[in-house]
Amino acid sequence: MPFKRIIERLKDALVDVENLFLKKESKVSLVIPAFNEEKTVARVIGEARKVKGLSEIILVDDGSVDKTPEIAEKLEVNVIRHHSNLGKGEALRTGISAAKGDIIVFIDADWKNVTPEKIKSLFLPILKNKADFTKASFSLKRGRVTEVAIKPIMKILYPSSKFKQPISGQFAGKKDFLEKLKIEPRWGIDISILLDAIEHGQRISEVDVGEVVHKGRTMEEKAEMSEQVLETILKKSGLLCSKHKLIIFSDKTLFQYDRLSETSLKMIDILRRKRLRLFLFTTKDVRPEYRSKFDKIIKIDLNPEHIALDAKQQAKKTNVRLSEVILVANMQGFEDLARSVDKSFCFEKSPQKLKNESKIIKTLPELFIYLE
């Protein structure tokens, strides 16, 4: 047997002995989110099955249209299927919910040069109570947007947190922490979990796993991923809203007669920089120079049922739920809608029925206090 292999076995034996003296015997679950990874998933699962200390392996198939789930099932791991592609965030959420272990490890299904040692290195610091959360640090031969975009903005917004690789699909954490998180549905999920770990004071360890080889992605895919990661960082730092996606204004809140006030114009610009959609529900015609300030302008009557229905239909067209909507109104007819949205605001001189359903504010800029 080669000397190097003997040393590796001795290290494994020492770790096994050390684990016997841990106060609590923790169970470790491995979750592999996958979407159309039939070329690599068998090797990833095969290497994972060699890892000592794993209590279960779960593959979450996120609506693959190739043979990914069938391959995983033949390898006798727990396969959970999504009927359609919901995104990596939802795949991780499913894995967290299904995992029975106290510690959950996540690896990508396209990690071509994965080894049992690399997988084990992700959960050992937690198992040995030297960390609460671990993430892989690695090198890639291809150029990375991380170096020119992600790391610089992290340095500005999170100066005390220094990571060689802020973004990694290879990480591990304690289930009681992970199941409390608000999971981003798209590619921002990996950085989102790391930033939550920082915010919650988790002891974070960066584990060097050497070179990581993934499948190649097109420039369009890389651009989309980078945009979603940057958007998530800005949301987590408070520069963009994460909960609220749409604000509905009635015309009497923003306009003085038929003109937008200077305060209204400044406020609209700030809200748009926060990536919020702005709808105007109005009984009047809007001057041409103001139309570009809003994502949609909807002509209404003052029937409360009609207004509430219009809002629900228009929001749905932009993939927004009423629970993600803020209403700012100052006229009759908005009472039903005020009861349906997440937050509703009006002014002291608003109709009494609307005041009964809304929080009263004195000026428009007060709205910023309540944005999430």
Image (tube, helix red, strand yellow):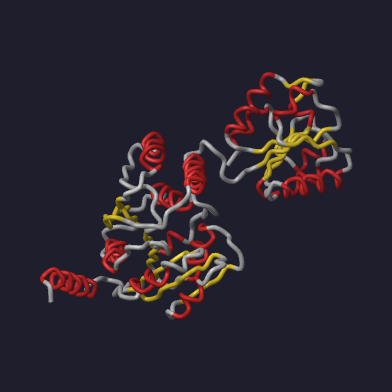
Residue sitting nearer the eye, 146 or 366: 146
Residue sitting nearer the eye, 65 or 340: 65
Return the residue found at the far left.
3
Q: In the image, what residue occupies the spot 62% across and 43% down?
A: 244
Q: In the image, what residue occupies the spot 75% across and 30% down?
A: 348
Q: Quadrant of residue 50?
A: bottom left
Q: Is residue 367 left or right of residue 126?
A: right
Point out the image quarter for the C terminus. Answer: top right
Establish if 15 lies above or below 237: below
Q: Is residue 97 left or right of residue 121?
A: right
Q: Position of residue 1 (x, y in %)?
A: 13, 77
Q: Position of residue 94 (x, y in %)?
A: 52, 66
Q: Is residue 116 left or right of residue 66?
A: left
Instruction: Tally the marks.
Output: 0
Q: Position of residue 147 (x, y in %)?
A: 36, 40
Residue sitting nearer the eye, 199 or 205: 205
Q: In the image, what residue occupies the spot 44% across and 60% down?
A: 178
Q: Is residue 368 left or right of residue 3?
A: right
Establish if 340 lies above or below 74: above
Q: Position of residue 327 (x, y in %)?
A: 72, 39
